[in-house]
Amino acid sequence: MQSMTLKTILIHPDPRLKKHCDPVTDFDRDLARFADDMLETMYDAPGVGLAAPQVGLIKRMLVMDCAKEAEGTPEPMVLVNPEVTWTSEERNVYEEGCLSIPGQYAEVERPKMVRVKWQDVEGKAHEQEFDELWATCVQHEIDHLDGVLFIDYLKPLKRQMITRKMQKLKRDKARA
């Protein structure tokens, strides 16, 4: 059994978080191992989603698990090259946070339901509809693959305020 490695989560602002990610083309053991490391990192953080660019890999891959720990069984998902194929007219507002923007939360409106197609780590195609928190999470993580952060949906003043807090956090961490 291969031991897992916790990855370092990049903190905004970081130029890698604003990059448009390349499609995954190699479905090999390294990809599966990286996906496992991402899940481990996400659970450790703790979070419900993590996109590859947040740990420095500029590829179209994300992991998520919105099953509430209290209700029991984790439902880890790895989505490679995910693509939204349908969105509902109905909208939902969730208070979103991000592991790359620790301690900051804001309400973001998104489609309530989405259909997403993706590949697994072996390259096999999947398609599924998500709603509620799962829909919000998958849209938030796919945004990361396009260089979009949840704060990009906020008014400029609020976004600048959060960015300044993150710059201070990074400076404080660098000094520590």
Image (cartoon, helix red, strand yellow):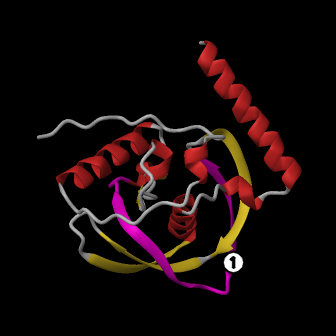
Residue at point 73%, 57% (across, down): 152
* Visible residue check, residue 105: yes
Quadrant of res 77:
bottom left
Quadrant of res 93:
bottom right
Residue at point 72%, 53% (across, down): 151
Give 38 or 134, whichever is nearer the viewer: 38
Quarter of the picture holding the N terminus? top left
For label 1, the residue is 91
Classify residue 29 as left or right of residue 45: left
Q: Which residues are magenta?
A: 72-98
Crowding at mark 1 (Cα within 10 Å: few <14, some 14-19, many 20+) = few
Amino acid type, label 1: Arg
Farthest residue to the left: give it. 1
Quadrant of res 14:
top right
Where is 156 relative to 12, above or below? Answer: below
Query: What is the secondary structure assignment of the residue under circle 1?
Result: strand
- Total labels: the figure holds 1
Residue 171 % position (x, y) = 68, 22
Classify residue 133 as left or right of residue 125: right
Quarter of the picture holding the C terminus? top right
Query: Does the magenta segment cover residue 95?
Result: yes
Residue 37 % position (x, y) = 31, 43
* Visible residue check, residue 75: no
Determine the main secondary structure of the stretch shown in magenta: strand
Query: Does the magenta segment cover residue 80?
Result: yes
Classify residue 98 as left or right of residue 115: right
Residue 57 % position (x, y) = 42, 48
Residue 123 % position (x, y) = 24, 70
